[in-house]
Image (spheres, rainbow, N blue to C red):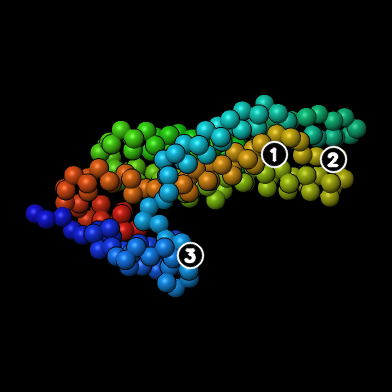
């Protein structure tokens, strides 16, 4: 049974700017429609993904240790870290805000760190384990990446609400800057990873990809 052709067999390359399938038989360097540079694969995907991921892990340490905001209520002020803010909102009955901050600041980064590490290690080991599930995991990481700045937005909204009601004062602290850097670098890490690497070890061996493989490869 011969395997179905994929984009590289047909000398086709998808433009990541306008989405045009370009003929790269004569090795063009630019998209014929929008002029954007063409790449058959993401350049240095593994190295860049690891670099961005490790950078985000480094910044995640001060993001949790340093205060992210200073709250002044009735003349008394105190600095709060991420977890300190979660506990403070919870104790004051704002469990919904506490839950949002916990999910955005702890759960989402933890999931992204674990998922990207799993994807990188399995690709480097040429693993054929759960390829469809790993491809879906990458799409999930891309999806939750859009909500990574939710914690920063919540702090800004709470600060605006407190000042509007004249209940006190809230000011951001250095920790929120490091958390913003964590968000940026995890997003860059996810964008740098090439999900087609998950399927390479199957197509390079000459095995006929099934319909699920073709759907996943074509989608990227």
The residue positioned 31% from the left and 58% from the top of the image is: 218
In x, y percent, where is residue 126? 28, 36
Residue 113 vs 213, above or below: the answer is: above
Residue sitting farthest toward the right: 75
**Gap between marks 2 and 3, in whole Å?**
48 Å
Residue bearing the label numbered 3? 36
Circles 2 and 3, Cβ within 8 Å, touching? The answer is: no
Question: Of callouts 2 and 3, which one flags the residue occurring earlier in the amino acid sequence?
Answer: 3
* Residue 91 in view, yes or no: no
Question: Of callouts 3 and 1, which one flags the residue occurring earlier in the amino acid sequence?
Answer: 3
* In-image side of 41 versus 149 (left or right): left
In x, y percent, where is residue 108? 53, 39
Q: Which mark is residue 169?
A: 2
* In-image side of 167 versus 1 (left or right): right
* In-image side of 182 versus 142 (left or right): right
Residue bearing the label numbered 1? 177
| Closer mark to the observer between disc 3 and disc 1 | 3
Circles 3 and 1, Cβ within 8 Å, touching? The answer is: no
């Amino acid at each position: 049974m011969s395997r179905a052709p994929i984009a590289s067999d047909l000398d086709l390359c998808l433009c990541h700017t306008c989405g045009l399938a370009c003929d790269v038989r004569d090795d063009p360097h630019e998209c014929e429609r929008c002029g954007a540079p063409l790449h058959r694969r993401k350049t240095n995907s593994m190295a860049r993904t690891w670099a961005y991921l490790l950078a985000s892990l480094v910044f995640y340490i001060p993001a949790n240790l340093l205060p992210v905001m200073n709250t002044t209520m009735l003349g008394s002020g105190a600095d709060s870290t991420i977890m300190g803010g979660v506990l403070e909102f919870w104790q004051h009955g704002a469990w919904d805000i506490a839950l949002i901050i916990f999910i955005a600041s702890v759960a989402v980064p933890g999931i992204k760190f674990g998922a990207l590490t799993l994807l990188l290690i399995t690709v480097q080991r040429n693993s054929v384990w759960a390829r469809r599930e790993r491809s879906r995991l990458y799409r999930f990481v891309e999806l939750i990446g859009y909500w990574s700045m939710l914690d920063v937005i919540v702090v800004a909204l709470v600060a605006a609400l407190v000042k509007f009601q004249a209940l006190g004062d809230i000011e951001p602290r250095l920790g929120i800057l490091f958390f913003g850097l964590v968000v940026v670098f995890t997003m860059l890490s996810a964008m740098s990873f090439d999900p087609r690497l998950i399927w390479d070890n199957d197509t390079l061996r000459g095995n006929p990809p099934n319909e699920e493989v073709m759907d996943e490869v074509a989608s990227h």
